[in-house]
Amino acid sequence: MTALSVDRAEHIDTDGALNMARKTAPALAALLADGSIRLGQSAVGRVDAIRQVGAALCDAGAVDDSYVEAMLERERSVSTYVGEGVAIPHATFAGSDAVRHDALVIVQFPAGVDWDGHDVRVCVGIAAQGNGHIALLSQLATVLLARDNAATLRAATSHEQVLALLHPKHSK
């Protein structure tokens, strides 16, 4: 993954808001509710994977059902694939009203999901109020820029392995 990953998710702010977001974002692990790490899942395609990620966000109480449709709309307009077998599905701005609180979910697909020609093994779903998604995308990019971290996430077999990657030392 490259620095372009955050750019591809269309969250560039030339006025320095991205750097400010990195300083003010909550710790990633703190945004995970019980059941928000789902390892060893399977999906029949990208839409199914996004629906599973959206369901996990709904189960966490972070969003209402309309957020899932806004996630699918985002995917129709721009791919949320960021590289290294990872996609970061999130909603369009129109879906922000459906967010109850900031949250993160991680859904792993060991057999892979065809993501418009890319092999995705992990989806990191995000929901954030206001412009909070910028901070979350920035932190996630920082964690996932290290090839070893993305590989560890793809191969994780325990929640502890995932949580270790999201520890603050990985997001500085």
Image (spheres, rainbow, N blue to C red):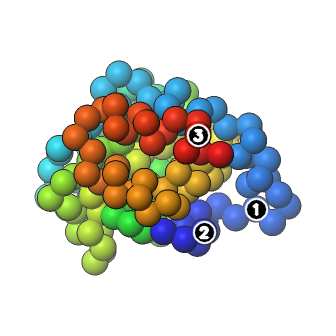
- Mark 3 or 2 closer to N-term? 2
Is residue 41 shown left or right of residue 12?
left
Q: Nearer the viewer, mark 1 or mark 2?
A: 2
Residue 169 got which mark? Answer: 3
Residue 96 image point, x, y percent: 57, 41
Give the structural element (helix, strand or loop) at label 2. Answer: loop
Q: Is residue 97 visible?
A: no
Give the structural element (helix, strand or loop) at label 3. Answer: helix
- Mark 1 or 2 closer to N-term? 2
Residue at left offset 15%, top offset 50%: 42
Residue at left offset 83%, top offset 58%: 16
Tell how many labels.
3
Q: Nearer the viewer, mark 3 or mark 1?
A: 3
Residue 13 got which mark? Answer: 1
Q: Crowding near pointer 3: few (<14 within 10 Å), some, many (20+)?
A: few
Q: Gap between marks 1 and 2, in whole Å?
A: 13 Å
* Residue kind at label 3, given as amino acid type: Lys
Q: Is residue 136 above or below residue 18?
A: above
Is residue 22 shown left or right of residue 144?
right
Residue at left offset 67%, top offset 37%: 25
Give the structural element (helix, strand or loop) at label 1. Answer: loop
Residue at left offset 41%, top offset 24%: 33
- Judge by depth and name the residue closer to the eye, 146 or 46: 146
Disc 2: which residue: 3
